[in-house]
Image: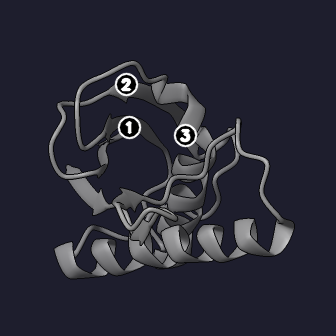
């Protein structure tokens, strides 16, 4: 199953719109980071509910494709904190009981096609 989670958007100081990623390279205030974590977590839960993903799976493998708005140099693994927040939202939804090693393999981060900023989660149940 596949789940696309669109990136929340914000504005730069120059008024340009940009995606609000959680990056391991960021140096932001803890309160701002907390707001972004909650925003991504809630987005993931809401998107899972809207798509009616199954609940109560015991073990899954997740691959994450990171879609940026344009081509250029980027490291998909830099936004692992964003993927972690989304996986926490999927746990809140009830997809899996917990995101520990007993229930989750991954996430494996990949660069996706440019276009609408966001992340595509490919979720495969492991028997």
- Could you say whether the residue bearing mark 1 is in a helix, strand or loop? strand
Tell me the quadrant of the picture where the C terminus can be found: top left
Nearest the camera: 6 or 52? 6
Answer with left or right where residue 38 lies relative to residue 17: right
Sequence-wise, the earlier of marks 3 and 2 is: 3
Nearest-to-viewer mark from 3 and 2: 3
Q: How many marks?
A: 3
- Could you say whether the residue bearing mark 3 is in a helix, strand or loop? helix
Sequence-wise, the earlier of marks 2 and 1 is: 1
Q: Residues within 10 Å of mark 3 (few under 14, many from 20)?
A: some
Q: Rounded to the nearest whole Å, what is the CA distance between mark 1 and mark 3?
A: 10 Å
Q: Rounded to the nearest whole Å, what is the CA distance between mark 3 and mark 2?
A: 10 Å
Residue at which label 3 appears: 79
- The label shown at residue 64 is 1
- Could you say whether the residue bearing mark 2 is in a helix, strand or loop? strand
Where residue 23 sits in the image (x, y, percent)? 62, 43
- The label shown at residue 110 is 2
Answer with left or right where residue 80 lies relative to residue 122: right
Note whether 24 is above or below 47 in the view shown: above
The picture quadrant where one finds residue 105 is top right
Write the residue at 58% across / 31% down.
Answer: 78
Write the residue at 72% across / 72% down.
Answer: 32
Contact check, label 2 and label 1, Cβ < 8 Å: yes
Q: Rounded to the nearest whole Å, what is the CA distance between mark 2 and mark 1?
A: 6 Å
Answer with left or right where residue 34 lies relative to residue 76: right
Nearest the camera: 65 or 15? 15
Write the residue at 21% across / 81% down.
Answer: 50
Sequence-wise, the earlier of marks 1 and 3 is: 1
The picture quadrant where one finds residue 63 is top left
Nearest-to-viewer mark from 1 and 3: 3
Where residue 116 sits in the image (x, y, percent)? 18, 52
């Amino acid at each position: 199953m596949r789940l696309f989670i669109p990136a929340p958007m914000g504005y730069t100081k120059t008024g340009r719109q940009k995606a609000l990623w959680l990056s391991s390279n960021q140096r932001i205030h803890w309160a701002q980071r907390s707001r972004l974590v909650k925003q991504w977590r809630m987005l993931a839960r809401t998107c899972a509910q809207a798509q009616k993903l199954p609940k109560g799976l015991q073990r899954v493998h997740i691959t994450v494709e990171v879609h940026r708005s344009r081509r250029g140099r980027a490291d998909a693994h830099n936004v692992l904190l964003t993927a972690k927040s989304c996986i926490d939202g999927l746990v809140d939804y009830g997809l899996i009981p917990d995101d520990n090693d007993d229930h989750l393999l991954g996430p494996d981060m990949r660069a996706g096609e440019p276009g609408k900023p966001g992340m595509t989660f490919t979720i495969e149940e492991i028997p």
